[in-house]
Amino acid sequence: MSYNLYNTEGIIIGGQDIGEADRVFSILTKEFGRLDILSQEVRLLKSKLRYHLKLFSYGRFSFVGTKNFWRLTDAEELLTFDDIYKNPAKLFVAAGIANLLNRMLRGQERDIMLWQEVKQALLFLEKEKFVPAELKRLKLLAGLRILHHLGYIGDTASWLKLSLGQWDKQTLEKIKDSEEKISQEINKAIKASHL
């Protein structure tokens, strides 16, 4: 039996160990949305793929669709978010973004705008230096933008301006006085989603 081979860019946003050596990775992909992809024997020391499959790795992934699941066949790491790994405060923000995505995304559906938003947020988090207050605002802004792209936060004028912008320190400064309101809006949207 032959299977179609798929290739796409993606960011690993989660994973779960299965059995003694396998792992299912949650990957936000450019072409397919969020996928859960099985990598067999990836936890063995002899595995060639294990070094390309760290949490928040941005890479190119190849996989096949079998009857019951997606199975990883190859991975090439394009970028490692080293600074995020070295900084616990940055890692906390990245984990919050990943948790929100894993919670809110069900099934696979291509969303190029969401893909770009998450990729840009993580690149911004990786490259810049932040004080704790800025990291808090970055996490809030990421949550607001993700939920807006998914349709849980409407297009009111105030939210639309924040949802469609660059990832820069000026934008983080603009939301300084709206942190509590943004947090309430995010919590309201998550509660309304029932996810």
Image (cartoon, grey):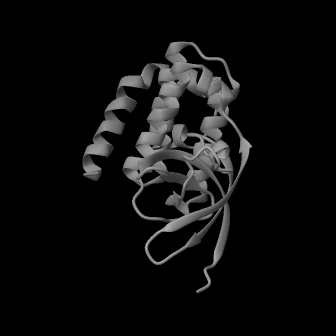
Seen at 58% across and 44% down, the residue is: 118
Q: Is residue 23 above or below residue 126?
A: below
Q: Is residue 185 above or below residue 27?
A: above
Left/right placement of residue 49 relative to residue 95 reads right
Q: Is residue 132 visible in this depiction of the protein?
A: yes
- Relative image position of residue 168 (x, y in whole percent): 65, 28
Q: Pick out the residue farthest to the top.
A: 131
Image quadrant containing the N terminus: bottom right
In depth, the one of 97 and 155 nearer the eye is 97
Q: Is residue 144 visible in this depiction of the protein?
A: no
Seen at 67% across and 35% down, the residue is: 123
Left/right placement of residue 134 relative to residue 144 reads right
Q: Is residue 83 above or below residue 167?
A: above
Q: Is residue 8 above or below residue 48?
A: below
In depth, the one of 23 and 102 nearer the eye is 23
Q: Quadrant of residue 68?
A: bottom left
- Relative image position of residue 76 (x, y in whole percent): 72, 51
- Relative image position of residue 104 (x, y in whole percent): 38, 51
Q: Pick out the residue farthest to the bottom.
A: 1
Seen at 44% across and 34% down, the residue is: 96
In depth, the one of 72 and 133 nearer the eye is 72
Labels in figure, total? 0
Seen at 49% across and 51% down, the residue is: 21
Q: Quadrant of residue 72?
A: bottom right
In depth, the one of 53 and 87 nearer the eye is 53
- Relative image position of residue 87 (x, y in whole percent): 58, 19
